[in-house]
Amino acid sequence: MERQLPDETVELLMIKAMLVDSHYTAMIAHSFERVFFDNESVGDIFTYVSDYFKQYKKIPPQQLIRSSLNDDEVSNT
């Protein structure tokens, strides 16, 4: 029987990869959209990281990502 990761876990792993691998971020930022994410907070983080990467061509510092979100979103991710 094939094991499958829950969608939320996959979404979080994608965000984690975006924060450590600029090549992955470039690929994902140009091929994914916010609407693909079920978790609203993860989608917000994706949008922020993607927009920042497209503008500055680098991964945003985690503190900037945190400051772009409200406290509830940070504690839920």
Image (cartoon, rainbow, N blue to C red):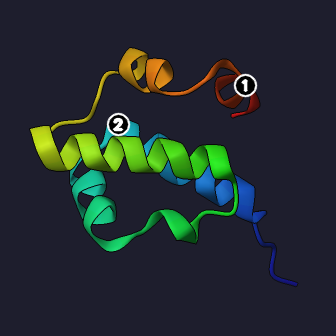
Q: Is residue 68 left or right of residue 28?
A: right
Look at label 1 and name its amino acid: Asp
Instruction: Give the class, few, some or many, for how many residues have Cα within 10 Å of label 2's Cα (few <14, many ≥20).
Output: few
Q: Would residue 59 be seen by someone viewing this image from the given angle?
A: yes
Which residue is rendered at x = 49% and y = 41% of the image? Answer: 45
Look at label 2 and name its amino acid: Val
Q: For residue 14, which numbered disc appears in the image? A: none
Residue 24 sits in which quadrant? bottom left
- Residue 46 x, y percent position in the rendering: 45, 49
- Residue 40 x, y percent position in the rendering: 66, 51
- Residue 50 x, y percent position in the rendering: 31, 50
Q: How many marks?
A: 2
- Residue 53 x, y percent position in the rendering: 21, 44
Instruction: Give the class, few, some or many, for how many residues have Cα within 10 Å of label 1's Cα (few <14, many ≥20).
Output: few
Circle 2 residue: 20
Q: For residue 72, which numbered disc appears in the image? A: 1
Task: Pick the residue in front: 57 or 1.
Answer: 57
Which residue is rendered at x = 75% and y = 31% of the image? Answer: 76
Q: Would residue 57 be seen by someone viewing this image from the given angle?
A: no
Residue 27 sits in which quadrant? bottom left
